Amino acid sequence: MPAVRLFAVFLLLCEASFAHAQTLVLLTENLAPFNQSISGRNFAKNDGITGISSDTLRAVCERARVECQQILRFPWERVYQQALKEPGYGLFSTARTPAREKLFKWVGPIATNDWVLMARADSPIQLDSLQGAAQYRIGGYKGDAISQYLIDRGLTVQTALRDNKNVEKLAKGQIDLWVTADPSGRYLARQEGLDELKVVQRFNTAELYLALNKDTPDELVQQLQAALEALRAEGQLRRISERY
């Protein structure tokens, strides 16, 4: 075999090995129905994690031939900082906001989530605008983009380390409104025994992404994005979503 051809074969083998050699640790939290531990606990790994985003990224990594480990931990702020600072790490399901845009490299969208203010079903609160919520006690999740969205607009938000604490506060009348997402917030509330909720203000629709540490090679990001788009075109993402 000519030397030039041998060298070309060598390069192809190297590229194949490179593709298989890529490894990522993808961090997440309990945010049903997008990502959640099967046990309901605040720690899980790989097959112990389920949800729309988790299943989607599992399929993406398989299609892209990238070894991905999924780890669910608590709290969100901890895993956010780890993905931000440590190469080889990513974070999902992450809202892609202007403040975060240059902090990560992005693959997605993998799902969508509406940002809402919720009240108990028996609450008389009605809102014509987001600023109208300023007169009420608002509970939110610490480090969450949705809570920060309100804070950036001058609203006061009582943040909790656990979002289910806001469900408890709402049920007890300790807060008037809960800034959360729909369907994930409603799903969490049902798990905590609070079924009767109403949306009093829907103020944004967020596309959810995989946020990768900014030192992730561009080639790897493109590889994952291409796999995601191929799965979307085949209808696989719709079928995953329909399971939940």
Image (cartoon, rainbow, N blue to C red):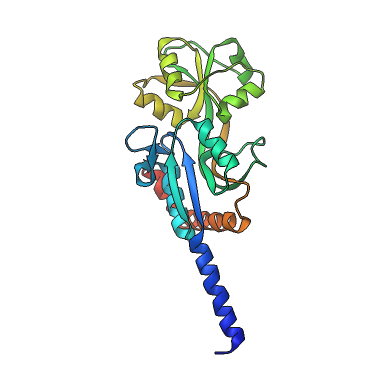
Q: Position of residue 78 (x, y in %)?
A: 52, 33
Q: Residue at x 40, y 14 (%)?
A: 171
Q: Position of residue 97 (x, y in %)?
A: 63, 36
The residue lying furthest to the left in this view is 39
Decide: is 7 above or below 116: below
Q: Position of residue 227 (x, y in %)?
A: 51, 57
Front-lying residue, 30 or 130: 30
Front-lying residue, 19 or 163: 19
Q: Is residue 109 visible?
A: no
Q: Position of residue 152 (x, y in %)?
A: 66, 24
Front-lying residue, 223 or 173: 223
Horizontal relation, residue 126 to residue 151: left or right: left
How many circles with numbers are drawn on the protein?
0
Q: Residue at x 48, y 45 (%)?
A: 26
The residue lying furthest to the bottom in this view is 1
Q: Quadrant of residue 100?
A: top right
Horizontal relation, residue 189 to residue 138: left or right: left
Decide: is 18 above or below 115: below
Q: Quadrant of the N terminus?
A: bottom right
Q: Residue at x 66, y 22 (%)?
A: 153
